[in-house]
Image: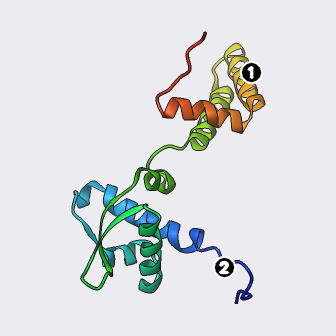
Amino acid sequence: MTAPDGPLPDVWFTRDLPVLRAIARLVDGPEHGASPYLLGAVVPASGLPKAEVVAAAKALASAGYIEPLTNHAGDIVRITAISAEARRLAGLWPTPRGEWERLLEQLRVRAASAPTDVERQRWQALADAADAVGEDAGALLMQALVGGYVPRAR
């Protein structure tokens, strides 16, 4: 139990994110088409109890991650869409940091599996240079690439 004056327990990783991912799978899956999804379908998809799914859906709606349909009592009954940020958080769309990590992984794999010593050294040099740039600057670079903006040389 949390002290009355202490912070509330974190529910993002234990409740809200699993529900968001379940909703994203339903909304994005081609087998479901573009229909609104009953909140009841999210319960088995998330693996969480209904009360937690309802609480998470309310939190996700208030944060703008999901577009809910409500009944006359104001209860969420269907989910019609998710936001672009929800797609990123659920892993459907790339994030700059995630893409930087994928690039580093690819460089390491190419260095390890290069057919010649010369190629291996070149790939390893590129991987070392990327590591030296660091993840913050690398994420900024990937943000420009993922977002479609590449600064022009002056």
What residue would you read off at disc 2? 8
> Does 97 sit left or right of 58 as displayed?
right
Q: Disc 2 or 1, which lies upstream in sequence?
A: 2
Q: How many marks?
A: 2
Q: Residues within 10 Å of mark 2 (few under 14, many from 20)?
A: few
Q: Residue at x 39, y 72 (%)?
A: 45
Where residue 77 appears, x then y in whole percent?
Answer: 29, 77
Q: Closest to the observer: 32 or 86? A: 86
Where residue 34 appears, x then y in whole percent?
Answer: 22, 57
SS class, disc 2? loop
- At label 2, the amino acid type is Leu
- At label 1, the amino acid type is Ala
> Does 137 sit left or right of 22 as displayed?
right
Placement of 112 over or under 118, stated as above or below: below
What residue would you read off at disc 1? 125
SS class, disc 1? helix
Where residue 92 appears, x then y in whole percent?
Answer: 44, 50
Placement of 137 over or under 50, stated as above or below: above
Give the label, 2 or 1, closer to the camera.
2
**In whole angstroms, how far apart are the C-alphas of marks 2 and 1?**
47 Å
Q: Residue at x 74, y 88 (%)?
A: 3
Q: Residue at x 59, y 12 (%)?
A: 153
Occupied quadrant, residue 127: top right
Q: Quadrant of the C terminus?
A: top right
Occupied quadrant, residue 96: top right
Q: Residues within 10 Å of mark 1 (few under 14, many from 20)?
A: some
